[in-house]
Amino acid sequence: MSILKKALTTAALATALMAQSAMAENVKIALVVKALGIGFFEAANKGAEEAAKELGDVDIIYTGPTDTTAEGQIEVINSLIAQGVNAIAISANDPDAVAPTLQKAMERGITVISWDSGVAKEGRQMHLNPSSSALIGNTIIKLAADHMPEGGDVAILSATSTSTNQNVWIEEAKKVLPNYPGINLVAVVYGDDLADKSYREAQGLIATYPNLKAIIAPTTVGILAASQAVTDAGLIGKINVTGLGLPSEMAGAVESGATESFAIWNPIDLGYAATMISYNLVKGTAKAEPGAEIPMGRMGAAKLDDNNEAAMSDPFTYDKSNIEQFKSIF
Amino acid sequence: MSILKSREAQLALAIAILTAGIALRFPAFVTPANLAGVFNDTSPLMILAIGQMIVILTKCIDLSVAANLALCGMVAALMNGAGVPLALIVPAVVALGAALGAVNGLLVWKVGIPSIVVTLGTMTIYRGTIFLMTAGKWVNAHQMTAEFKALPRASLLGLPVMSWVAIALILLFALVMTRTALGRAFFAVGGNPHAAVYTGIDVGRTQCAAFVLSGALAGLVGYLWVARYAVAYVDIAGGFELDVVAACVIGGISIAGGVGSVGGAVLGAIFLGVIKNALPVIGISPFWQMAISGIAILLAVAFNASQSRVKGRIILKPAEA
């Protein structure tokens, strides 16, 4: 088995080396994902290919371990160093475990960035977050406001009361409320990411606030449970459930009309942006340093903060028009 | 007899006072429609509490009920996705639940491992099995047929089918526990195992039967749960086994075995159900909600403990108990 594996690796390396000599002038960007066969990352690869096509002189090497382990990713990175790629863009399984190997890659002159799931600061030149807390906070309010032209009451159904990211998003959402006149946030309740508790909390909101127009759930369990509660109460069209969810999970709610629209980061855009950034760093058209702005093609520019981190964009909005396309992707 | 009877009456009174208190803050809570909703929402807890009560009566405990529920629910969802008709899915998951319960029962009976250890182990195994079957993927509303989702919420004489299932099982088990040899054997095994042996009752086998019943009920609730919330994933009903045990304890079922009734388990479940449904509407800070649930449980248990217990060992209690 291991001999066969070695032989295959050698063959793969040989092919890669031959390919390298054939297209020596192309920039080789490796998109290293958490594991192969995950819809989210397959979609990111689509975006990377789109960027490669747009740029012209880029080869994308889409790779990753077969299971989501840091060890597997280290093996993959080592083989990429041997292949002499120009850039590695990684979504890490562990922020610290892969850092030493990535440092080795940087010492060989390879551009290293992380995206989606970050690497410790010393193991990459920059990190691309799919979005930022401020953008998410604004998006979830906007999703509700878009479908209530006359304003009205909205409530937030969160996960646990101690969940850090949820609380930060809710804080950011409260900050932007004054920008949406007529939108009145009446309650923040917690479903603990349990389907039954979230369902009961949603029922509670419906019973307590007769003028409720929207329930905002920035959590996948909550948004599903709230959609179900609204459907069961026969209030589709009266109360819109929105927030953050995955297209594969939300397809039913969008179809029934309980959810007009919801948001989540778009993996295609993410793969596209990571490729564009890698390309610009390799070509030297931009430098990864605090305050720098790195062009991302159609996605605008990534502005780096003090930790060399950047946010890509607003979460992407899904509704009846595109759910069919995305529900099979992730 | 009168003591047991009054304990249930006291619990019913406590529920009535609790409900009245809630109504003061949120009058709509006591509308018949809302109370029916609370009953319906509590149905899974009531059904599981009956199963747990039988297990606890035999001096055992079943911590794997929620994991069993989740596994059976996932299997139901996957069978539905594979096009198996609903008329086959429901018996299949009840049988699967019973089989999973039998695994617990056989380990307790034949291998002699304490039930708390057995069910802690199978709890993790059952959840792990769901992960192996699905690789952590969810089965979502749009992947379930309309028929699959509609059954528990279909209305029959003003109540959803799920409530009727609970009512039917309460009546059935009230009868089984008081009027059948097996039902009396559960009490005997927990009340005095040695005496039970002399009367010709196989203690291990009776405990195994209790686990099978608890498992079968968990299997049925697995389907109802997944169909009601229209989603199946690894963590559904996470931690629910503790609610089930709490419902039993509140209902006056002695953890030492041999003491308890179907009525107690059901009232214990309703008590918890009223609290769970009331907390979201009476405007109490979510940070307090968990503490309030915990305090209610402790108060109820302390109340039960302070009740004068029957001294000495009970072998068989009067059938009317």
Image (cartoon, coloured by chain):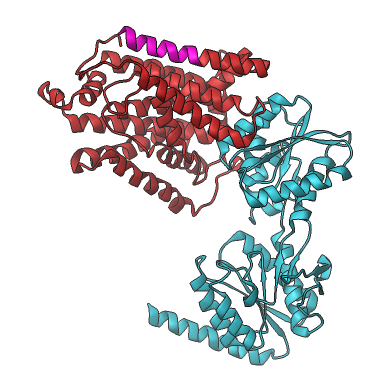
Q: Write the residue at 27% across / 13% down.
A: B179
Residue A325 lies, in percent from the top left, at 71, 53
Q: Judge whether residue B4 is colored magenta.
A: yes
Q: Please tell me whether residue A302 belongs to the stretch shown in magenta.
A: no
Q: Is residue B236 above or below residue A292?
A: above
- Please give the range of residues in magenta: B1-14
Horizontal and vertical percent for residue B111? 20, 43
Question: In the image, is residue A235 above or below residue B68?
Answer: above
The chain letter of the cyan chain reads A
In the drawing, does residue B24 fall left or right of residue A304? Answer: left
The percent position of residue A142, horizontal first and vertical second, equals 82, 45
Residue A104: name its quadrant.
bottom right
Tell me where residue B247 sits by quadrant.
top left
Colour displayed for chain B in the image of the structure: red
In the rendered image, which quarter contains the N terminus of chain A?
A: bottom left
Residue beneath the point at 35% across and 34% down? B215
Q: Nearer the viewer, residue B19 or B319?
A: B19
Examine the residues drawn in magenta and state their main secondary structure: helix
- Residue A85 placement (x, y as % from top left): 64, 84
User: In this rendering, would B210 be left or right of B134?
Assistant: left
Please give the name of the residue rendered at 89% of the width and 33% of the height, measured from the top-left corner.
Answer: A150
